[in-house]
Image: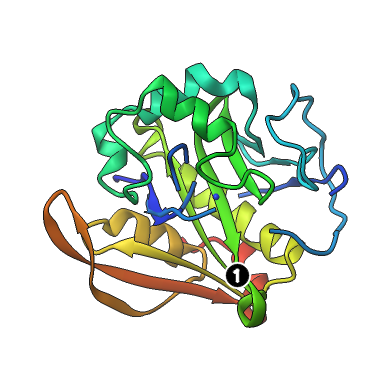
Amino acid sequence: MRECLCRCFVPETTTVKASVRPRVAPSVGHSVIPASAAPRSVACGNLVPMSTPVSRSRFHDVALRGEGFVLRPWRSDDLGALLEHANDIRIVRGLSDRFPHPYTREDGERFLAGDVVDLRDPVLAIEVDGQACGGIGARPGHGGRRHGAEFGYWLGHSLWGRGLMTQVVALYAPWVMQQLALHRLQATVLDNNPASARVLQKNGFEEEGALRCAVVKFGELRDLRVFAKVKRSLEDATQTAQ
């Protein structure tokens, strides 16, 4: 099954153990990626040693451990892996235009410098076998919408079809809702990206409708499907559908 990206854009030491972009947006199979802070929470798990992150924030020490992957802050030494996985037309098809193609060294350096998305937000790399191979992040709202956020993710093509992104979202979504005290977490998905929609549905996100004729992608007018999880169903986020 094709499971790649979601067109959403991506405290003190905090780790979580789970069972079961770049000029990017990490987001959010993928969602149309967008990528700011709030209360602390304490979780259990194993701390993963890391190099110096590229940006200091309340999330600079976070390490969320899943089965075969770790979610942790982007680091300056991720540039090579970022270029390897991001410079792929198959990745770009499901993401916003902030994720360019070709993906150049300059693009990667700008992303890791925090010039594309705010890396002080919970924007994390997806690390597999010691290498960053994708990303996930959330961008909180402001003012009256400060209790909501949009999130997105992307994953290198070599790791598609393994169910990995479903597990990543299962770990990240409840964590970020708790960290940012969110009542609502949403993602938007291009109408030609059913794999990303399945990732969200398997994690309890409900489809709320569509933004019709919302995006022009590669010269074609596309709808955006809107998915959301609200705080009353937060516990469901840890129960991945079969």
In the image, residue 196 lies at what x, y percent?
36, 55
In the image, residue 240 lies at what x, y percent?
54, 60
Residue 208 in the image: above or below residue 44: below
- SS at mark 1? loop
Residue 167 in the image: above or below residue 77: below
**Residue carrying label 1:** 141
* Front-lying residue, 171 or 191: 191
Residue 16 appears in the rendering: yes
Q: Which residue occupies 40% across, 32% down?
A: 156
Q: Which residue occupies 38% across, 30% down?
A: 86
Q: Is residue 2 left or right of residue 66?
A: left
View extreme (left): residue: 219
Residue 212, by quadrant, is bottom left
Residue 100, by quadrant, is top left
In the image, residue 187 lies at what x, y percent?
45, 65
Residue 39 in the image: above or below residue 143: above
Q: Which residue occupies 25% across, 45% down?
A: 93
Q: Amino acid at mark 1?
A: Gly
Residue 129 appears in the rendering: no
In the image, residue 179 lies at what x, y percent?
76, 61
